[in-house]
Amino acid sequence: MVRSFVEMLRADLGIRPENVVAMETSLPSDEYRVENKRLAFYQQLLGRVGSLPGVVKAGAVNIVPFSSNYTSNTFQIVGQPPFPKGREPEAEVRTSTPVTSTRLEHRSTPDDYY
């Protein structure tokens, strides 16, 4: 069981965390109530972070991958009978700045990732 856990820790998750810095921000809701103001803040923040010496890329995501936080939505499949109430499948939702990873850009179907 311990060996399985160690092997799981060594699994390639498709991300490279080396030389990555993550931070959490929280804007005052009174001052940033309007969406355009929040968007302008984050655009300015990413521009400033991206211009720092040594920074190759700067991006943002609403929830860091593999964290304990998540946002999910239920869904139905068009052309199929609806799922029973309370038993709908869920999909985790992430909002991010544009992805520039070649691993993602050059894949054509979800099956290519597995």
Image (cartoon, rainbow, N blue to C red):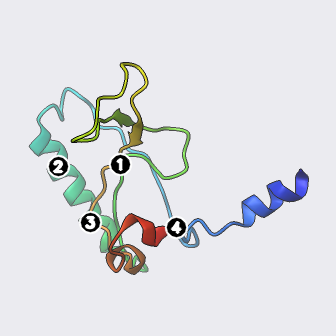
Local packing at callout 2 (Cα closer than 10 Å; few below 14, some 14-19, many 20+) is few
Q: Nearer the viewer, residue 91 or 19?
A: 91
At label 1, counting other C-alpha atoms closer than 10 Å, the crowd grade (few under 14, some 14-19, many 20 or more) is few
What residue is shown at x 18% (from left), y 35% (from top)? 32
| Residue of label 2 | 39
Badge 4 crowding class, 10 Å Cα cut-off, few under 14, some 14 to 19, many 20 or more, is few
For the residue labelled by badge 4, is the local secondary structure a helix, a strand or a loop? loop
Residue receiving disc 1? 94
Q: Give the mark nearer the N terminus: 2 vs 4.
A: 2
Front position in the image: 72 or 101: 72
Amino acid type of the residue that numbered disc 3 sits on in the rendered structure: Pro
In this view, which residue lies farthest toward the right?
2
Q: Which type of secondary structure does the marked residue at label 1 adopt?
A: loop
Mark 2 → mark 4, Cα distance in angstroms: 34 Å
- Mark 3 vs 2, N-terminal side: 2
Q: Which residue was labeled with disc 3?
A: 98
Q: In which quarter of the image is residue 84?
A: top left
